[in-house]
Amino acid sequence: MEMRVPLKKKVTLPITALVVAFFALVLLAALAAVTPFYPEASGDKVATGKSITLDYSHADQGYVMIKHKGTKKALMVQFTLGKVKVKSYMRGDGEYDVFPLSYGSGKYKIEVFEQVKGKKYTQLLSQTVNAKIEDEFSPFVMPNRFTNYTAESAAVAKANELFTGLTEDKDKINAAWEYLKANMVYDYVKAATIQGTPDYAPVVDDILKAGKGICFDYSALFGTMLRSHGIPTQMIFGYLKAAGNKQYHAWSNVYLDGEWRLMDSTFAMQAYPDNLYAPTQVN
């Protein structure tokens, strides 16, 4: 995070004062970098449809929040920005879901649909949101529908424990990576039974406690640990082409040293080349 301090006039400070001021700025920058960012539905800008509320008060921070009054039917959200069109599912329990505006500033067309039967859906809301995102990393240092946590989450507490005494992002990333590699196993039973449930969303504390999960779970837990410490982390959906197969998969992109780096915590033991990954959605 770049910090700029406007000066009204040029001043000359003693060397000691300059040194103190320098380290104060470094400390402030470091604190700002790890300050958790938690979304809120403030109600300043709201659109409503059939049983749907869309709060886009903080689109400039890279997110919107959507809730349904309550339904057991499947709910689908579609985001369109230019040629980019992505679909996600949302909860129907009356609580807000957070959705990132992952593709930067622009006019997003946001549509919400409710399942009628099978693959047939009816539209509940359509709203255009002009997002002028102030910080391109904002969508990736906060919880959302796919990487969902709070300040009280056990997964955040575990990250705090793992990162104690660490000041460099690369060391924190490595600590989270090594923890997952040593303490998580792939849940093949869940992988087989989760098929046909497109609205599945990981509960990171349950995953942490169980010590097992599918690729979606690995990515959510890894992302929670890093995001809660201000390290930009994208959850990526797409396909992995390995061993002659093309399988739907989830992994992470982590921002480090000025660039996004692909990190697949599910396959930490066997790193696949980046060119085998074909992303379809950024969250």
Image (cartoon, rainbow, N blue to C red):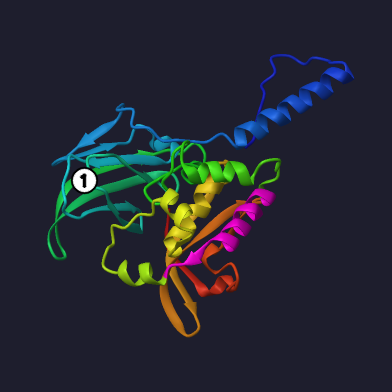
Residue 174: say if magenta: yes
Toward the viewer: 109 or 185?
185
Toward the viewer: 148 or 20?
148
Give the residue furthest to the right: 15
Residue 64 position in % (x across, y down) = 35, 40
Examine the rendered structure and indicate whether residue 41 appears above or below residue 62.
above
Give residue 32's quadrant in the image: top right
Question: Label 1: how many residues lie within 10 Å, few (<14), some (14-19) or many (20+)?
Answer: some
Examine the rendered structure and indicate whether residue 158 appears above or below residue 17.
below
Give the residue furthest to the front: 210
Image mark count = 1
Q: Is most of the magenta stretch helix, strand or loop?
A: helix
Left or right of residue 260, residue 241 in this image: left
The answer to whether residue 136 shows anywhere in this view is no
Which region of the structure is painted magenta?
A: 170-187
Residue ID at (17%, 43%): 70
The answer to whether residue 55 shows anywhere in this view is yes
Residue 176: say if magenta: yes
Residue flagged by tag 1: what amino acid is it? Ser
Residue ID at (51%, 51%): 223
Q: Which residue is mark 1?
A: 126
Residue 156 position in % (x across, y down) = 52, 42
